[in-house]
Image (tube, helix red, strand yellow):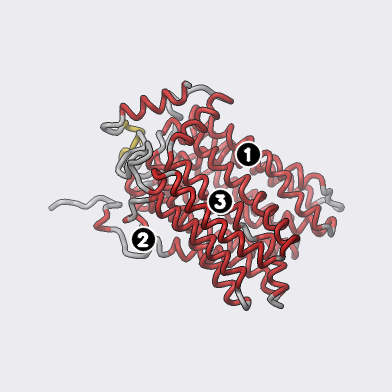
């Protein structure tokens, strides 16, 4: 009697999440548990930082500066962290960055317990925490394909996203409640305990050494990763579609203003939470995603849907319709995010995964601030609704232009892009994820190394 392996399409559920990565990979279970613990504490601490800055200053500008001081560390250390992830053991990088984050949480705790907490440690520690998190992120992203089988990557991404969305909702509520009573110190203490727990879980992971032929370090390594991304139309399209969605249709700065126009100031918090509700719903019903093979097309359609949903949000006649459009936008964003993860993990060679994960951080770092600036400027000139509606349609139009100019983005196997059945140059052997060269990829790997050496 033949046995169907975990992750086989025949065993995938129709809608519910595919738990095959959780069942078959101990390494993935450890990583999942680590990320869940950290995401809950980190989101609670993010809210506590905002609450404490407001308590100390009463200034919206002082609160907003917390995001500004995190931007440069995110971009700089994210790119460099990608180089390190390709050259050194990713498990060690993840663990020691976790230790640094734990120390930062303790520093915030100590400051919060002082009779008169100071403001400057909030900025200084936030910058250091972002630097450590940015160094760590490429190693985390590049480790998943080592821990699960290739056919389980979609399910693994959906499960991790499910955890992150649930923690975002719970962490925001927890941080907001505890930061007011008894105070931010308790949130920082919980975060420190979470980092310590995660450090212990990560210690149990198998070794995840970087690729032996990862190429040069520092600047040459970063530029080599950028050149590779530019030469792959599917990767370039995924980055540009995400940037278009964030730059043209990032709505967060306008939530308080539209809530006021709808005579529903009480709904401002719900507007911030609504996209996460949609994203959570997608991950709960993610079983169908494993059957999608044209990931670029799925990303393009989801990014365009995000823009159209934001246009609908701007046109909403009442608050409940507005919230419904935000839920739909969050669902579209999550679909795009999951398929971007799958595209990158299935097609990027192992020796490049860290650097390309660093490139991915550029869209996270640049997109939202640029989007908030665009939306704010347009709203000040033409009104809140015009900013939202025009941005939404510009997003959908930009995605259509990207798809037309980069045919390899939506049609695998064209424009110099690998077909959907191609491999990333390595596969996960069993559940330990030992890198084994995939048959038929020697020529592709040689080409990738030549790109790096340019």
Please rate how many residues cluster around mark 3, counting C-alpha atoms within 10 Å: few if below 14, some from 14 to 19, many from 20.
many
Q: Nearer the viewer, mark 1 or mark 3?
A: 3
Q: Position of residue 38 (x, y in %)?
A: 57, 51
Looking at the image, is 433 positioned above or below residue 83?
below
Disc 2 marks which residue?
Answer: 287
336 and 79: which is toward the camera? 336
Q: For residue 361, which quarter of the picture? A: top right
Q: Nearer the viewer, mark 2 or mark 3?
A: 3
Q: Position of residue 131 (x, y in %)?
A: 65, 39
Among the two numbered marks 1 and 3 on one chain, the one whose residue lies closer to the N terminus = 1
Q: For residue 347, which quarter of the picture? A: top left
Query: How many numbered circles are shown?
Result: 3
Q: Nearer the viewer, mark 2 or mark 1?
A: 1
Disc 1 marks which residue?
Answer: 75
Please rate how many residues cluster around mark 2, counting C-alpha atoms within 10 Å: few if below 14, some from 14 to 19, many from 20.
many
84 and 206: which is toward the camera? 84
Q: Label 2 to label 3, Cα distance in Å? A: 28 Å
Disc 3 marks which residue?
Answer: 244
Residue beneath the point at 59% across and 53% down: 246
Please rate how many residues cluster around mark 1, counting C-alpha atoms within 10 Å: few if below 14, some from 14 to 19, many from 20.
many
154 and 38: which is toward the camera? 154
Residue beneath the point at 78% across and 45% down: 121
Q: For residue 73, which quarter of the picture? A: top right
Among the two numbered marks 2 and 1 on one chain, the one whose residue lies closer to the N terminus = 1
Res. 357 mark: none
Residue beneath the point at 56% across and 64% down: 275
Q: Are the residues flagged by discs 1 and 3 in contact, CB closer than 8 Å? A: no
Q: SS of the residue at dot 2?
A: helix
């Amino acid at each position: 009697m033949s046995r169907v392996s975990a992750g086989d399409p025949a065993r995938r559920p129709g809608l519910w999440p595919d738990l095959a990565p959780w069942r078959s990979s101990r390494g993935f279970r450890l990583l999942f548990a680590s990320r869940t613990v950290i995401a809950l504490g980190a989101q609670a601490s993010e809210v506590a930082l905002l609450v404490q800055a407001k308590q100390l200053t009463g200034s919206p500008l002082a609160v907003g500066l917390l995001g500004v001081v995190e931007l440069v560390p995110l971009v700089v250390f994210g790119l460099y962290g990608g180089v390190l992830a390709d050259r050194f053991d990713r498990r060690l990088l993840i663990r020691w960055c976790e230790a640094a984050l734990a120390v930062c949480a303790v520093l915030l705790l100590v400051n919060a317990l002082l009779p008169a907490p100071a403001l400057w440690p909030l900025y200084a520690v936030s910058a250091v925490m972002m630097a450590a998190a940015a160094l760590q992120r490429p190693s985390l992203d590049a480790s998943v394909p080592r821990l699960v089988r290739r056919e389980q990557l979609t399910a693994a991404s959906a499960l991790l996203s499910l955890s992150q969305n649930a923690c975002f909702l719970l962490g925001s509520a927890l941080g907001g409640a505890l930061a007011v009573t008894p105070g931010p110190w308790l949130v920082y203490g919980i975060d420190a305990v979470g980092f310590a727990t995660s450090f212990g879980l990560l210690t149990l992971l198998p070794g995840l050494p970087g690729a032996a032929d990862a190429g040069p370090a520092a600047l040459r390594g970063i530029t080599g990763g950028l050149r590779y991304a530019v030469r792959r139309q599917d990767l370039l399209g995924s980055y540009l579609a995400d940037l278009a969605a964030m730059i043209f249709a990032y709505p967060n700065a306008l939530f308080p203003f539209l809530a006021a126009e709808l005579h529903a100031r009480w709904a401002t918090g719900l507007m911030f939470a609504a996209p996460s509700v949609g994203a959570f719903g997608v991950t709960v019903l993610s079983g169908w995603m494993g059957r999608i093979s044209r990931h670029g097309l799925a990303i393009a359609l989801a990014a365009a849907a995000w823009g159209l949903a934001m246009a609908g949000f701007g046109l909403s006649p009442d608050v409940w319709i507005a919230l419904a459009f935000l839920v739909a936008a969050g669902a579209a964003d999550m679909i795009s995010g999951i398929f971007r993860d799958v595209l990158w993990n299935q097609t990027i060679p192992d020796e490049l995964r860290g650097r390309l994960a660093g490139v991915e951080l550029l869209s996270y770092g640049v997109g939202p601030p640029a989007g908030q600036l665009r939306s704010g400027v347009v709203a000040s000139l033409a009104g809140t609704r015009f900013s939202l509606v025009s941005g939404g349609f510009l997003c959908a139009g930009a995605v259509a232009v990207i798809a037309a100019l980069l045919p390899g983005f939506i049609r695998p196997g064209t424009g110099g892009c690998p077909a959907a059945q191609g491999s990333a140059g390595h596969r996960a052997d069993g559940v330990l994820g030992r890198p084994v060269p995939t048959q038929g990829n020697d020529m592709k790997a040689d080409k990738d190394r030549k790109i790096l050496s340019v």
